[in-house]
Structure formats: structure tokens, C-alpha cells
Image (cartoon, grey):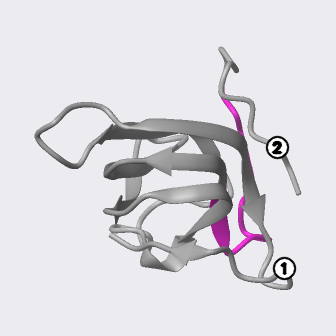
Amino acid sequence: MPKINYLNHGLLNLDLTSYDRLRINFDGMFPDLNFNILVFDEYGTWAQGGCNISYFIAGSFKVDFPLNKFARHDVVDWTHIHNIDVIFQAANPLGSPNLALTAFSAIPSSDPAGTISCHF
């Protein structure tokens, strides 16, 4: 599984056609969370996946974003992904959630499903 370095200052130039989802691993979360993943290809065309988690989760869990459920998944060039933005925001009026991320990766269809599967 490729690890995607969020500190990369250049273009990623990823070919994600061998993978069917992006995964974020958490080590706990409280309280509500809304987050989105935006991918951009070499032409600036974008696709977006989103998720709302509205409950406390203790311990480790995995959130999958199936690529075929991204909005505009049919127009982005998955062979040349240049940028990936992960956007976290509170899903409640009380403020920002507490969370710990442990990994961000692309996952092939042969791997078991994560704890939660999200779609836009």
C-alpha cells in the first residue's frame, strides 16, 4: 500500500487505477466530524468524497472512501493524480473535534473493508 505523504511540496503524480479506495486510519475521535477528500488530476479536474461521523469512537478504526463513490469520479484522470486535499471540520456547533490520524493510504480491492465506508 502506498503511503501518501501529506508534507509533499511537489506534485504527487499518483496512478490510483490499481486501487479502489482511499483509507484514513484513526486512533480515536470525539465528538462529531465532517471531512472530505478532494483529488486533483494533472489538468486540475477534481473529484470529491465526503463523510460525517456523528458519534464517539474509542480506539483504532479505519475509514474508507471508495473511489467510485466520489462525486465526479468519472471525469478525473485517476492515472495522474497530482494533489490530494483532506479537509477536517467540526460537524457540530460546539467546535472542533479531537482526533488522531495514524495513516493515509490507497487500498486495493483485495484488502478487507475498513470499519466505516463513506461516500459523498
| Residue 83 visible somewhere in the drawing | no
What residue is shown at x 16% (from left), y 36% (from top)?
A: 94
- The quarter holding residue 63 reads bottom right
Q: On the image, numbered disc 1 is attached to which residue?
A: 111
The residue sitting at the top extreme is 9
Looking at the rendered image, the quarter that the N terminus falls into is bottom right
Q: On the image, numbered disc 2 is attached to which residue?
A: 3
Vertical side of 70 occupied by 56: above or below: above
**Disc 1 element:** loop
- The quarter holding residue 90 reads top left
Span highlighted in magenta in the image: 11-23
The spot of residue 45 in percent (x, y) is 39, 49
Q: Nearer the viewer, residue 19 or 81?
A: 19
**Disc 2 element:** loop
Marker disc for residue 80: none
Are the two marked residues, 1 and 2, in contact with CB atoms closer than 8 angstroms? Answer: no
